[in-house]
């Protein structure tokens, strides 16, 4: 099963990156950073600037894999802002681009939360789990990572 890790954090080479790359090596997964793409916030009228990368990213990266791991730091017990924007757009695919949204069914969504220590928060995971359910995706596994003495630590939840 081909796996893609989608990183959404404010620092391109921070803790989330280090931990996501460790998991990528373990899973033999590809890795992308949302900071490398221009993704505009959800708009009810569904009109986005021509330089919006969201649809192309879904078509060429997300749908090319059977499993997508969403890696985000825990910001105030929630996903990062860039990940939230991505999820707003992703969940809207069932209405705005049904042809793409339906292709997510049966694929696997996993999560890598990243914090300052070994503490994982179940509330952080709820939006991912519920989004997977809404999109018809299989959910799990869940991982939590942190740095300890500069070394990536990852546990399956």
Image (cartoon, grey):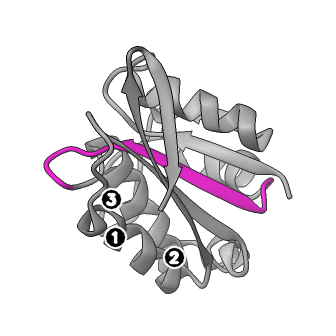
Check residue 68 for magenta coloring: yes
Q: Earlier in the sequence, mark 1 or mark 2?
A: 1
Q: Is residue 139 shown left or right of residue 108?
A: left
Residue at (28, 37) in percent of width and height: 117
User: Local crowd at mark 1 within 10 Å, few (<14), some, or many (≥20)?
Assistant: some
133 and 22: which is toward the camera: 22
The answer to whether one can see residue 62 in this image is yes
Q: Residue at x 31, y 51 (%)?
A: 41
Query: Which residue is disc 2 drawn over?
Result: 132
Where 60 sits versus 15, above or below? below
**The residue stretch that appears in magenta:** 64-77
- Whether residue 51 is visible to the viewer of this picture, yes or no, is no
- The label shown at residue 42 is 3
Quick one: SS at disc 3? loop
Image spot of residue 44 (x, y percent): 30, 69
Instruction: Name the one closer to the observer, 8 or 93.
Output: 8
- Residue 127 marker: 1
Estimate how packed mark 2 is, as few (under 14), some (14 to 19) or many (20 or more) residues with alpha carbons within 10 Å.
many
The earlier-in-sequence mark between 2 and 3 is: 3
Which tag is nearer the camera, tag 1 or tag 3? 1
Q: Which mark is residue 41?
A: none
Q: Position of residue 155 (x, y in %)?
A: 50, 49
Which comes sooner in the sequence, label 1 or label 3?
Answer: 3
Separation (CA) of disc 2 from disc 3:
18 Å
- Considering only vertical position in the picture, is 99 above or below 151? below
How far is the residue under mark 1 from the one under mark 3? 17 Å
Q: Is residue 7 left or right of residue 81?
A: right
Q: Is 36 part of what is drawn in magenta? A: no
């Amino acid at each position: 099963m081909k796996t893609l890790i989608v990183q959404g954090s404010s620092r391109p080479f921070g803790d989330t990156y280090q931990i996501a790359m460790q998991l990528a090596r373990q899973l033999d997964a590809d890795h992308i950073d949302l900071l490398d793409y221009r993704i505009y916030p959800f708009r009810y009228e569904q009109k986005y600037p021509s330089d919006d990368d969201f649809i192309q990213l879904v078509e060429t990266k997300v749908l090319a894999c059977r499993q997508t791991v969403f890696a985000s730091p825990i910001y105030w017990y929630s996903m990062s802002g860039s990940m939230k924007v991505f999820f707003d757009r992703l969940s809207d695919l069932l209405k705005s681009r049904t042809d793409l949204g339906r292709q997510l069914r049966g694929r696997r969504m996993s999560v890598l939360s990243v914090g300052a220590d070994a503490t994982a928060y179940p509330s952080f995971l709820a939006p991912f789990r519920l989004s997977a359910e809404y999109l018809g995706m299989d959910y799990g596994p869940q991982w939590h990572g942190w740095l300890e003495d500069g070394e990536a630590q990852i546990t399956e939840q």
